[in-house]
Amino acid sequence: MSEERYIAAIEISSSKIVAAVGKTSGEGQLQVIAIEQDKAVDGVRYGIIQNLEDTSLRVARVIDRLQKRTGVAPRLIKGVFVGLSGRSLKSIPSAVTINLPDDTEITDDILERLKREAMRAAIDSSLEVIDAVPRIYKVGKTETTSPKGTVGNRIQATYDLIVCRPEIKRNLERTIQDKLGIRIEGCVVTALATGHLLLTSEEKRLGCMLVDMGAETTTVTIYSKGCLRYFATIPLGGRNITRDLQSLSLLEEDAEEIKKTSGNAIAPEFPSSLNLNGVKLSDVSNLLVARAEEIVANVVEQIEYSGLKEGELPTKVVCIGGGSRLQNINELLSAHINLPVVRGRLPKYVLVDDAKGSSADVEEMISVLYAGATLSKHQCLEEPAREELPVVDELPPAPADPVIEEEEEEPVRRPKKEHSWMRSLKNRISNIFSAPDDDSDILE
């Protein structure tokens, strides 16, 4: 069995910051262990971080909560894959050709050279090329989607160059790497990651439009004949509806709550005469329906902009994102585009342990996580370093018992033995002094 790897990913959008940790064994299955999120407030606009300090603090808070979750702790997040999204992201078609010697076998080196040539194509200087996604190859006169191993003297390819404003990547690096010291293991285009994970190969071959309705933008990608054919970002989203409702003298949070609980993308047959906290529901409906119609009309228009011909057009629409939860928005889109519209769902090989993974708001995040797990070999989490105790070669000698010095006893002085003549003399002297006082005795 392949070695388990822990992957971390983060997506910073205008409405929220979402991060997740997953585990993969390299067998194509992803287990999502933990998901955390925080509000982005006004630190991010249309995919570009405006306030580096505020955003870095919010990212740090989300990362800290992730590291404390069961299944993650005590591991530390040292690297992350980052999702790229925003108003400036789009695709630009680019065709390149390389002439080769006769009967040349197409190898990985030739395909890499072809991709580099495509990415050097002249584009608007205000944009940066993030990736080049191949549509179709032509080796000699034969079209193919798998050119490796074929033989020819010429190879052509049409790529979709994925471009965006340089500030998107630069500010992500300054926020995550410079301020927090967390490595960016790779930048993943969120719209492509969701298409890779949520759409089946059959849907891509038959033709499918993936619509991601976010807070400030709506992303449209179109697949046909098994590959990406069009990618664009519309600068309209669910927050536009919320701001419209704020014109009814509502705070943003109140307008957002009314949109979620009472909003309907399709006008009712009989307008309501009820008031909700002093706000006429008929006024809410008028504003909401008008904006929903505008968003849907712009989505439908992308089919015309794609330039796809008959037989290449999508046969189905898959919707994801928080904006797609607005009541009847999918029904409104289906009526305008005249195609079936369904909700996007995670495939069975993605297991979500966290209950927060059931939310429609995290499908994009899980797609970025899956891209990091399957398209790289990076390990994002590390075990914390253990403190090493100092090594002692030998134990110090035990302290000796204290020595108590005994005091020397003074020798006992014994009386010396007296000789007999000494005793006789002492007695005679004693007798003299002890005799009675008599003068005759003295005169004798």
Image (cartoon, helix red, strand yellow):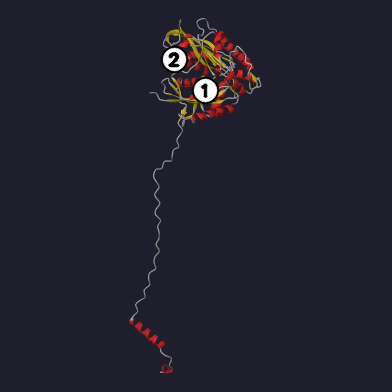
Distance from Cα at disc 1 to Cα at disc 2: 27 Å
Q: Quick one: quadrant of the C terminus?
A: bottom left
Is disc 1 in contact with disc 2, using a CB cutoff of under 8 Å? no
> Nearest the camera: 66 or 360?
360
In the image, residue 341 sits, relative to residue 414, either above or below, namely above
Q: Residue furthest left?
A: 420
> Can you identify the residue that label 1 sits on?
82
Q: Residues within 10 Å of mark 2 (few under 14, many from 20)?
A: few
Secondary element type, mark 2: helix
Q: Where residue 108 is drawn, which disc sits there?
A: 2
Question: Which quadrant would residue 347 be assigned to in this image?
Answer: top left
> Nearest the camera: 135 or 65?
65
Q: Does the rendering let one see residue 156?
A: no
Residue 100 appears at what percent x and percent y?
Answer: 46, 9
Total marks placed: 2
Amino acid type for the residue under numbered disc 1: Val
Numbered disc in front, either 1 or 2: 1
Residue 34 appears at what percent x and percent y?
Answer: 48, 26
Q: Does the rendering let one see residue 152?
A: yes
Q: Residues within 10 Å of mark 1 (few under 14, many from 20)?
A: many
Residue 25 appears at what percent x and percent y?
Answer: 41, 23
> Nearest the camera: 136 or 250?
250
Q: Where residue 62 is drawn, which disc sits there?
A: none
Amino acid type for the residue under numbered disc 2: Asp
Secondary element type, mark 1: strand
Q: Quick one: quadrant of the N terminus?
A: top left
Q: Earlier in the sequence, mark 1 or mark 2?
A: 1
Residue 284 appears at what percent x and percent y?
Answer: 63, 17
> Nearest the camera: 180 or 316?
316
Apparent side of residue 120 relative to residue 276 in the rendered image (left or right):
left
